[in-house]
Image: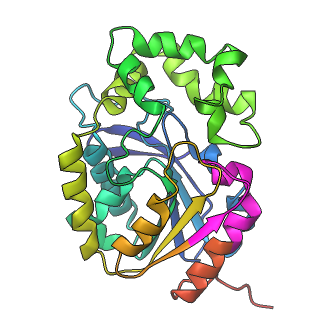
């Protein structure tokens, strides 16, 4: 897997390559690019780039002084775009919503459009039951305890926790992959805890959200009708916030829409891209 050195440390990424329009996929805590494993193969004609951000599922610890707050990781994502020379990027978020804050930074000029798929927004950082996870991570040894609990099916699959993020269920081997790095490495657990406990207070989050009104490029908001973490009303509210926002709701899906409805998600994503001037590269034929 390719890797790149950034100010916070070395991160891994996947890149399908090609000359098509660039889609950069983000992920949640403590996930990685496998969150999009069902969607990327459906997007022929695009260059899909999937960085493994330091949200706890990364394999290489960051520097001890790295800023792994929500805004810090958003800036790191922007640095990643700059280092790879990616422009007019379609930035796709799911679960973690802090990537939206990138468009308030200078590096946000590289983001040509955004797709916000059932993600944190407004003051919903961390969302719902994840607030309990953040509290656990703030206690010494808390991340270590969490990784052990995630080996217990009754805890791992609980509908009020990670088990509620998908109506179809997240395969055990995928969950093991996501939590594996923090299980094995104390330094990764340190990074995990830094990010998980970094959400600003409500007033700050709402102030940041208001700044997003200045992002005047196309935004597709994709919301899940069965979501337990992201409030249903946040979908239309986000679409209204952005001057060029539009909303699509997907039924029979929870937070991890790429897990529950990959075909439908790929379809609405492709339609949005074509409508906004980023249609797929067609092979000569």
Residue 177 in view of the camera: yes
* Residue at the right extreme, as displayed: 285
Residue 136: x and y in percent read 40, 17
Q: Quadrant of the N terminus?
A: top right
Q: Would residue 249 be counted in the magenta stretch?
A: yes
Residue 5: x and y in percent read 35, 44
Which region shows up in magenta? 248-267
Q: Nearer the viewer, residue 104 or 67?
A: 104
Residue at point 28%, 34% (across, down): 198
Name which quarter of the figure residue 273 lies in: bottom right
Q: Would residue 81 be counted in the magenta stretch?
A: no
- Tell me how the rendering is colored: rainbow
Residue 170 vertical placement versus 283 (above, below): above
Residue 180: x and y in percent read 58, 22
- Please state if 195 lies on the left or on the right of 275 as rendered: left
Q: Nearer the viewer, residue 237 or 105?
A: 237
All told, the count of numbered labels is 0
- Please state if 208 lies on the left or on the right of 53 as rendered: left
Residue at point 52%, 43% (across, down): 229
Q: Quadrant of the C terminus?
A: bottom right
- Please state if 201 lies on the left or on the right of 250 as rendered: left
Residue 52 vertical placement versus 129 (above, below): below
Residue 278: x and y in percent read 54, 83
* Residue at the front extreme, as displayed: 233
Residue 112 in view of the camera: no
* Residue at the bottom extreme, as displayed: 285
Name which quarter of the figure residue 131 lies in: top left
Residue at point 64%, 48% (across, down): 254
């Amino acid at each position: 897997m390719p890797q790149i050195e950034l100010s916070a440390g070395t991160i891994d990424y996947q890149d399908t390559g090609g000359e098509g329009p660039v889609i950069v996929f983000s992920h949640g805590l403590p996930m990685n690019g496998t969150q999009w494993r069902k969607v990327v193969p459906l997007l022929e004609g695009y260059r899909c780039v999937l960085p493994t951000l330091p949200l706890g599922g990364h394999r290489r610890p960051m520097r001890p002084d790295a800023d792994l707050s929500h805004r810090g990781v958003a800036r790191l994502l922007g640095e990643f775009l700059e280092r790879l020379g990616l422009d007019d990027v379609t930035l796709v978020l799911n679960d973690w919503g802090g990537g939206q804050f990138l468009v308030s930074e200078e590096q946000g000029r590289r983001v040509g459009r955004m797709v916000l798929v059932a993600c944190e927004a407004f003051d919903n950082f961390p969302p719902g039951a994840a607030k309990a996870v953040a509290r656990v991570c703030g206690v010494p040894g808390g991340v270590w305890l969490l990784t052990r609990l995630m080996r217990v099916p009754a805890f791992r699959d609980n509908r009020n926790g990670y088990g509620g993020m998908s109506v179809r269920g997240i395969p055990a081997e995928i969950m093991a992959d996501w939590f594996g790095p923090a299980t094995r490495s104390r330094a990764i657990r340190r990074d995990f805890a830094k990010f998980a406990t970094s959400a600003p207070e409500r007033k700050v989050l709402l102030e940041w959200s208001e700044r997003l009104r200045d992002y005047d490029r196309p935004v597709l908001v994709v919301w899940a009708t069965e979501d337990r973490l992201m409030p249903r009303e946040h979908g239309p509210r986000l679409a209204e916030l952005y001057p060029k926002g539009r909303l699509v709701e997907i039924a029979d899906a929870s937070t991890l829409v790429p897990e529950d409805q990959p075909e439908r998600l790929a379809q609405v994503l492709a339609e949005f891209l074509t409508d906004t001037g980023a249609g797929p590269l067609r092979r000569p034929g």
